[in-house]
Image (cartoon, rainbow, N blue to C red):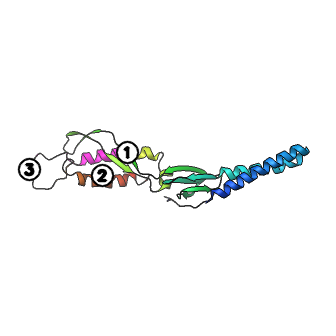
């Protein structure tokens, strides 16, 4: 499995300047060509327009807590995580991935606890992408993956513990009702394991 490779990028202002200068140059060549009636300026015009398109096509803006995954013809070339205005190879596919923390407000699930008692349970999961390579390439849709795996983890955790003990026992039994902190820790561990391929 490949991991995220942080990548630096050239200043976007240089790419913008090159693009604007070549556009102005192309406009000047077009005006001169029209005035002189010469077709010999067609090749310089096309070349200047091509350079302008390539220079402007490589501009990207990376916002705070955002990343751009760079792919060239199916090959991963790295991730730009620094925020700012950059220029990269214009042929890169530049996929935007947010690094912000997000909340998943899970739906109420009807499940049976360890004792077979029907209960309704829900969880709020706060998560964020740590490895952009895994989020972009290891799963089809990482947002949906988080939803499905979170629901599966809550179902598994609810089925592994009783809702409450209705008998007086000396042993410390982890229950969903009384052991909120421990249940939370168990759920965090399971979610970390389940979401590792995507985040």
Element at label 2:
helix
Measured as percent of width and height from the top left, residue 96 is found at 53, 49
Q: Which mark is residue 21?
A: none
Q: Are marks 2 and 1 in contact (CB under 8 Å)?
A: no
Instruction: Give the residue drawn at x 47%, y 48%.
Output: 139
Instruction: Give the residue drawn at x 58%, y 61%.
Output: 8
Cα separation, mark 1 vs mark 3, equals 37 Å
Cα separation, mark 2 vs mark 1, equals 14 Å
Most foreground residue, 142 or 21: 21
Q: Is residue 13 left or right of residue 157?
A: right
- Residue 117 in sight from this viewpoint: yes
> Badge 2: how crowded within 10 Å, few (<14), some, or many (20+)?
many
The first of marks 2 and 3 along the sequence is 3
Q: Which mark is residue 104?
A: 1
The region drawn magenta spans: 148-171
- Residue 74 in sight from this viewpoint: no
Q: Are marks 2 and 3 in contact (CB under 8 Å)?
A: no
Element at label 1:
strand
Cα separation, mark 2 vs mark 3, equals 26 Å
Q: Image height check: is 113 above or below 55?
A: above
Measured as percent of width and height from the top left, residue 67 is found at 52, 54
Mark 2 or 1, which is nearer the eye? 1
Q: Which mark is residue 168?
A: 3
Q: Is residue 132 left or right of residue 47?
A: left
Most foreground residue, 68 or 1: 68
Residue denoted by label 2: 187
Element at label 3:
loop
Measured as percent of width and height from the top left, residue 148 is found at 38, 44
The first of marks 2 and 1 along the sequence is 1
């Amino acid at each position: 499995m490949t991991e995220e490779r942080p990548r630096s990028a050239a200043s976007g202002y240089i790419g913008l300047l090159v693009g604007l200068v070549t556009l102005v140059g192309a406009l000047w060549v077009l005006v001169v060509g029209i005035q002189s009636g010469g077709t010999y300026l067609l090749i310089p015009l096309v070349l200047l327009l091509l350079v302008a398109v390539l220079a402007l096509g490589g501009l990207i803006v990376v916002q705070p807590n955002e990343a751009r995954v760079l792919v060239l013809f199916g090959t991963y070339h790295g991730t730009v995580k620094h925020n700012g205005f950059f220029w990269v190879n214009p042929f890169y596919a530049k996929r935007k991935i947010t690094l912000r923390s997000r909340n998943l407000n899970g739906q109420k699930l009807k499940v049976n606890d360890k004792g077979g008692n029907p209960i309704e349970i829900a969880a709020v999961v706060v998560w964020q992408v740590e490895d952009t390579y895994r989020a972009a390439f290891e799963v089809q849709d990482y947002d949906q993956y988080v939803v499905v795996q979170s629901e599966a983890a809550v179902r598994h955790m609810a089925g592994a513990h009783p809702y409450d003990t209705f008998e007086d026992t000396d042993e410390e039994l982890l229950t969903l009702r009384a052991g909120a902190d421990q249940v939370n820790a168990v759920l965090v561990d399971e979610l970390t394991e389940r979401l590792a391929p995507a985040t």
